[in-house]
Image: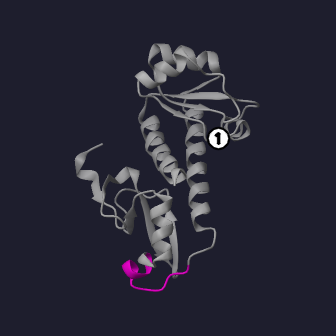
Amino acid sequence: MDKKYKLACSLTGNIFYLKQMLLFKEMNNFLICDVNARLNEKGIWCNPSRYDIEKAIRSQVFDKIFKKKLKIQNSFTENIENSLKLKVLNLVGLSKKAGLLEIGYDKVIKSLKNNSIDVVLIANEDSKLEGDVLKIIDDRKILLNKTFSRSEISKAVGYKNVLCVAIMISNLSATLNSDFYKLMKFKLN
């Protein structure tokens, strides 16, 4: 990522790449989080930490920044997480349409050995990938994610009972990496 796209988090002051941050806006006196924000959009850019966001809500930091009393839904943080998950799954489906998705263990392992993928999703119910395969994933710094269920992955790619998919190295996989970063950072807290 280009260094000119770094910005201080409005909540913590810590520096992040803009692609790793979430955009908060005010709309009709409601606080909204735009997980699909473009880099040139205006609003409050914050790190994707659930802890920091919830703390800011409790302390009314968003009200102070926007200089007005904002309405915030009870399920605000859950909605952010669900939106991030949906965005990632939509990108996985888009990867399939673009011909950039390997589906099934055999194809994923072959692509791992060919060094042609940089994102691997494994259903959270599964524990088949072990040993040498996990070592390859670690050594090559390939993003491994076990957030989604078999049914969520299957629905995203349009097949039944999909346990494992991988996205080939591309601009789409780079976008997916930054969205996974946001989702995982949000879920950690």
Tell me if 47 is positioned left or right of 31 in this view.
left
First to last magenta residue range:
62-71
Residue 183 % position (x, y): 52, 49
Query: Which residue is farthest right?
Result: 160
Residue 53 % position (x, y): 47, 65
The N terminus lies in quadrant: top left
State the residue position of label 1: 148
- 86 or 138: nearer the viewer: 138
Number of numbered discs on residues: 1
Under tag 1, what secondary structure?
loop
Residue 145 % position (x, y): 55, 36
For residue 135, above or below residue 44: above
The amino acid marked with disc number 1 is Phe
Residue 73, quarter of picture: bottom right
Residue drawn 61% across and 61% down?
78
- 36 or 184: nearer the viewer: 184
